[in-house]
Amino acid sequence: MLVNVLLYKVGKEEEGIHSIDIKGKTIVLMFEDADDAERYCGLLEAQDFPKPSVEKIDQEEINLFCSQAGYEARLVVKGFLPKTEEDRLLISPPQRNLEENVCSGTSPNNQQIGQSPIPDDLDEVRKNLEKLL
């Protein structure tokens, strides 16, 4: 199944996937509905966060990427209604963002909410992402 994910700097060396941090876990959001993904992008932009682009990618590929990177993938189904405060973060970004993580070997502790830390095997991850497109 194709899902909608939020990517930054598509096709560039610094390409990244949007993620959020929930209770110390890095969560990559996958949206079943493109309109829901676009709405989330608009909410990010309204918070002065860089606006990602919405890209369709096979759900299996995102799940594989996340398992290799130690992340968790969460599917936001069309018509999703949050039941908890944690669920609310799946349809509305956190009210604050951490400092932007620059590609300079910073530790995962300095990561920005919304941008995954840079893994040690960046070339392999890049190849996997290129396969997705």
Image (cartoon, helix red, strand yellow):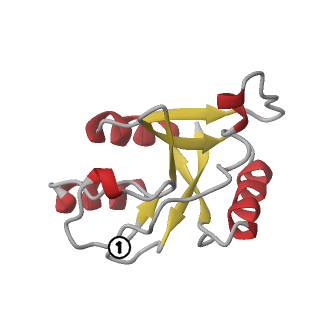
Which quadrant would residue 74 be assigned to in this image? top right
Residue that extends furthest to the left in the rendered view of this protein: 120
Which quadrant would residue 30 be assigned to in this image? top right
Instruction: Name the residue tied to disc 1.
Output: 14
Residue that extends furthest to the bottom in the rendered view of this protein: 12
In the picture, the quarter occupied by the N terminus is top right
In the picture, the quarter occupied by the C terminus is bottom left
Q: Position of residue 85 (x, y in %)?
A: 71, 29
Residue that extends furthest to the top in the rendered view of this protein: 83
- Please state if 115 lies on the left or on the right of 13 as rendered: right
Q: Residue at x 67, y 40 (%)?
A: 89
Q: Residue at x 39, y 54 (%)?
A: 116
In the rendered image, the vertical position of residue 89 relative to residue 35, given as above or below: above
In the rendered image, the vertical position of residue 72 relative to residue 54, given as above or below: above
Q: Which element carries disc 1, helix, strand or loop?
A: loop
In the image shown, does 44 or 37 lie closer to the viewer? 44
In the rendered image, the vertical position of residue 64 relative to residue 106, given as above or below: above
Q: Position of residue 126 (x, y in %)?
A: 28, 61
- Please state if 65 lies on the left or on the right of 53 as rendered: left
Mark 1 residue crowding within 10 angstroms, few (<14) / some (14–19) / many (20+): few
Q: Position of residue 3 (x, y in %)?
A: 60, 44
Residue type (three-letter) at the residue carrying disc 1 = Glu
In the rendered image, the vertical position of residue 85 relative to residue 32, given as above or below: above
Q: Position of residue 26 (x, y in %)?
A: 43, 40
Q: Residue at x 23, y 54 (%)?
A: 119
- Please state if 26 lies on the left or on the right of 110 as rendered: right
In the image shown, does 133 or 126 lie closer to the viewer? 126
Q: Residue at x 32, y 33 (%)?
A: 67
